[in-house]
Image: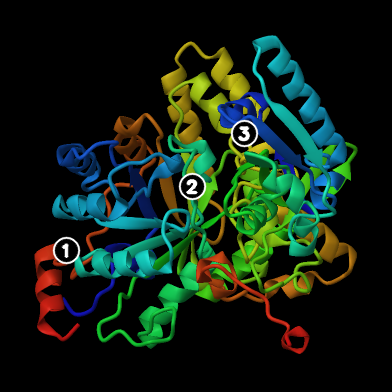
Amino acid sequence: MTDNKSNLQRVLEAGHFSVSAEIGPPMSANADFVRKSARALLGYVDAANVTDNQTAIARMSSIAASYLALQEGVEPIVQMTCRDRNRLAIQSDLLGAYALGLRNLLCLSGDHQTFGNHPESKNVYDIDSIQLVRAMKRMKEEGVFINGKPSKQPAKFFLGAAAHPFADPPELQMIRLHKKVDAGAEFLQTQSIYDIERFSEWMEEVRKAGLHKRAYILAGVLVNKSLKSLEMTSMVAGIKVPEHLIERMRKTSDQQEEGLSIALELINGIRRIEGVAGIHIMAVGWESIVPTLIERAGLLPRPDMPGTEAVSSEEAIREGGKKDA
Amino acid sequence: MIVAEQKPVKEIIESLEGFRRILIASCGTCVTVCMAGGEKEAVELKSLLDIWNKETGTENDINVVVPKRQCDVEFLDEIAVEAENADVILSMACGAGVQFMAERFPAKVVLPALNTKFMGVTRDVGLWTEMCQGCGNCILEKTGGVCPVTRCSKSNFNGPCGGSSGGKCEIDGNVDCGWQLIYDRLKALGRLDRLYEITDVRDWRTSRDGGPRKVEKKDMMV
């Protein structure tokens, strides 16, 4: 291996339209669950997000599950929220993640804990997601911790952040996007897109600001299995589902097929928009459909990037052990 | 002001079980304004406890004192006689007042009658809202006079999360998004450009995270 670039970074740098999906760790210590989820995506995605206590529900850690996915040959995108850890814990966990061979990092605020299954808990928010991105950029480029002290072998993640084309207030969300890129975000995964017209307008603003040239925009698509799922999705803050899509789901005799058709149309629509570098597929509760969706969207085969498959965790650990910590 | 609300009467009654001479102490400042622990509330609480005692045949003796405030020892000195004659003091001050009362009268059991909530303002008749967490390093000059530490549910320093929708916070449709408020203010003031600058990580030592805090005004100390 010549450098530490992740497969996702190589795919994007080579100009390929990237495909990523998600692995949701279980509410248990079941490693096989993660391995199976990863194996189902093998060959279909360039990388997969491994969520960090998604919707504030306590689950197997993103880093541990990412490591399991990596062992199955699927490149993980570690998620790190600012909700559960202070700067000590975040940096320590991320050094550990990098030592285990994990190379992509998505920095998030995290859903507020009142949504989850431990609403009684304290939250942390010692630093926010933009400060986290900047901290990990400094660690990568300057080799320092948040306190400015050096690390002899710092973590050098391919850095990502979330983008919210439909959250409010739009003007401020766009300023925030600028800040994320300024902070060092190299890729931006958007919240689920249902309204292509509005997303196109948002992308126009992104292009005007030149942000698509400074960070890869990976558009989020959520595939819904049922009318109920689509209706629930439409109630999430920051997601706007046009009424005509809900109407389509209501009228159809085959909701699964309709859900799949809608996702396919969205992917095709999104691919035509200038400046979108990839697609990120979410399938909350319908993970089994993801390979089919990717295949039917004509996104196969995934590019084979020489040099990245060697990022085995064993090798990373050996490399880490060579030098003084 | 410090905003508080009275504990459920049932909880107060339970905490008083076994005590005969009860002294209720109101506080004349913040908790009077937010109608939780002022003289009026103290008298009302005494009436409720008297009714309870009558109905249950409990024998005890309840007195009310109304110190100006409980966070300055001179006002606690003024109720020393009543305090010494009581078995228990039910403080209707904020947590600071309860603790200071306990310090002043170490031989007495001091019980809280309120739950202390936050530093806030009177938003409407009967409505108080949180405005300040006392983080010890005010940045309101940067955020249009709206505090992101307190009024953003995630204390974000660099703008709203993706959960801001129609001016409201994702945690509750009745909670304003703090960053929407900051945005509205700065836009109206023509100062939105200030928000492009990334606010760096905070030094939380000025907040409670640095341990219990104190303020010293050297020129006042003799």
* The C terminus of chain A: image quadrant: bottom left
Q: Earlier in the sequence, mark 3 or mark 2?
A: 2
Residue A21, x across and y down, in percent: 36, 46
Q: Amino acid at mark 2?
A: Gly
Position of residue B214 in the picture relative to residue B132 (left or right): left
Asked if residue A11 shows in the view, the reply is no
Q: Which residue: 63% across, 64% down?
A: A176
- Please check whether the numbered discs 3 and 1 fall on a single chain: yes
Q: What subunit carries mark 1?
A: A
Where does label 2 land, which residue? A220
Determine whether the residue tagged by mark 1 lies in a helix, strand or loop.
loop
Residue B49, x across and y down, in percent: 72, 23
Determine whether the residue tagged by mark 2 lies in a helix, strand or loop.
strand
Where does label 3 land, which residue? A241
Residue A1, x across and y down, in percent: 15, 76
Position of residue A304 in the picture relative to residue B191 (left or right): left
Q: Residues within 10 Å of mark 2 (few under 14, many from 20)?
A: many
**For the residues bearing labels 2 and 1, Cβ distance under 8 angstroms:** no
Question: How far apart are labels 2 and 1 at the CA level?
Answer: 25 Å
- Describe the colour scheme in one phrase: rainbow
Query: Quarter of the image holding residue B195?
Result: bottom right
Position of residue A215 in the picture relative to residue A247 (left or right): left
Q: Which residue: 86% across, 46% down?
A: B33
Q: Amino acid at mark 3?
A: Val
Position of residue A283 in the picture relative to residue B90 (left or right): left
Which mark, residue A309? 1
Question: Relative to residue A165, is residue B199 depicted above or below?
Answer: below
Which mark, residue A273? none
Determine whether the residue tagged by mark 3 lies in a helix, strand or loop.
loop
